[in-house]
């Protein structure tokens, strides 16, 4: 089970913008916060370069427990997610026999406002450079 999510098909067109998730309590969900521009409902899908634009997404006051990872933000190399805001996030791992993972972000740009638990250092602050994949090495 997931919490709040936006998922789009590879090769899609159009946009998702101005979406706000706020004041949400989750309990024992695999992934509380998700953006997935690589959604596939089959075991394998052809990788495509076009994508639905995702921007102006706000997650505010999301609290609770997770069983896999707190955040999964997988955005397109060619059309990164922009203006993603995480504000007052408090997500804790559910105690038990779960294999836990760190927050995951790929090509996701925006801002963090405190408090954020756990720390989500993978979100890239600001806006993407035009036509360039951003990695940790590019930022150093």
Image (cartoon, rainbow, N blue to C red):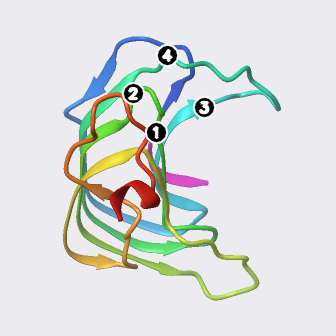
Q: Quadrant of residue 18?
A: top left
**Residue 60, percent from left and from top:** 22, 60
**Residue 17 is inside the magenta segment:** no
User: In this figure, which residue is indicated by the disc labeled 2?
Assistant: 79
**Residue 75, percent from left and from top:** 46, 39
Above or below for 8 versus 58: above
Q: Which mark is residue 39?
A: 3
Q: Which mark is residue 75?
A: 1
Quadrant location, the C terminus: bottom left
Looking at the image, residue 13 sits to the left or right of residue 125; the answer is right
**Which of label 3 and label 2 is nearer to you?**
2
Q: Element at badge 3?
A: strand
- Main SS category, magenta section: strand
**Which of label 3 and label 4 is nearer to you?**
4
**Residue 24, percent from left and from top:** 32, 61
At 45% from the left and 60% from the top, the residue drawn is: 137
Mark 3 or mark 2: which comes first in sequence?
3
Is the residue under label 2 in contact with that under label 4 (CB below 8 Å)? yes
Q: CA distance from mark 2 to mark 1?
A: 7 Å
């Amino acid at each position: 089970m997931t919490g709040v999510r936006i998922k789009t098909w590879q090769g899609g067109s159009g946009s998702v913008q101005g979406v706000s998730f706020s004041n949400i309590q989750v309990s024992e969900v695999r992934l509380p916060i998700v953006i997935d521009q690589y959604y596939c409902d089959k075991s394998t899908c052809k990788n495509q370069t076009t994508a639905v634009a995702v921007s102006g997404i706000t997650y505010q006051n999301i609290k609770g427990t997770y069983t896999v990872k707190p955040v999964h933000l997988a955005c397109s190399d060619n059309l990164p997610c922009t203006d993603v805001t995480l504000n007052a996030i408090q997500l804790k791992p559910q105690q038990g026999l779960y294999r836990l993972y760190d927050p995951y972000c790929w090509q996701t740009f925006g801002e963090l406002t405190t408090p954020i638990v756990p720390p989500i250092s993978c979100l890239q602050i600001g806006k993407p450079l035009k036509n360039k994949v951003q990695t940790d090495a590019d930022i150093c």
